[in-house]
Image (cartoon, grey):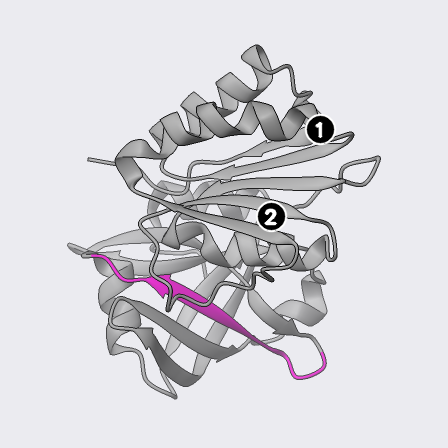
Amino acid sequence: MAQGRGWEGTVLRLMRAKDFTLTVTRAEDVTPRYRRLRLADGGLLAATGIHPAMWVRLWFTHTGRPHQRAYTLVDPDPAAGAFSLEFALHEGAAGDWARAARPGDTIEATVQGTRFEEPAPAPTHVLAVGDPAALPAINSVLDAFDPVPATIWFADGRPDLPFRTDAARHDLRHVSRGELPDRVRAELPGILSGTAHPYVWITSDTRTTRTLSAYVRRELGVPRDRVHALGYWRAD
């Protein structure tokens, strides 16, 4: 199944990645720029199991070449062999496919590299930084650590996005993308000072993620095993 996927497919095959064919069963436009697809998993969940913020690589064709992007599973149901994927719609192969996807359409997926290491001791406060591309992962982390309180700095969000936040225990702070790093630097230290066991989850664009993860670890002294930082996309 990895044939025709270029060097990425070759490397994943050598790393014993597992390949599956997903089939669209339902499509929903959450907003004009955010789309949810329900998919039959082709045996994926039975073969791999599930964990918080689990993700798969989807394979697209872009200018005649293979192209892969990672997406977080939403509401995985092993008994039904199904899960959803949510797409913040941008220009490009992934967005084009998601916009056009209809029940019966299929797409190839690879599972390799996804993992989740639960911090110990358990968090007493989750501090998350992200944007629409990271919303499924942030929602998954909030679900995993229910009912732990959380503070979320969210860039370029809309109130009609499918946030799984509870106003009683989640402080959702909408910020513009340009002010995101400064807002986190200004507000995070005060929250950390009153938190016994923080867990920091940073999943924004690559540049912002690197900047903030370095700040949290080096300047604020949060241990590496209490910080998850992964750039979800590259800004122009």
Residue 14, compared with residue 49, is above or below; it is above
Point out residue 157 in the picture as x, y percentages from the top left corner.
35, 54
Q: Can you identify the residue that label 2 sits on?
A: 114
Residue at 24% of width from left, 77% of height from top? 100
Point out residue 23 in the picture as x, y percentages from the top left corner.
45, 80
Q: Residues within 10 Å of mark 1 (few under 14, many from 20)?
A: few
Q: Can you identify the residue that label 1 sits on?
A: 194
Q: Is residue 92 left or right of residue 83?
A: left
Observer able to see residue 212: yes
Disc 2 marks a residue whose amino acid type is Thr
Question: What segment carries the magenta color?
Answer: 79-90
**Residue 126 within the segment the image draws in magenta:** no
> Residue 5 or 45: which is nearer the viewer?
45
Identify the element where label 2 is drawn: loop
For residue 146, which quarter of the picture? bottom right
Give the number of callouts. Answer: 2
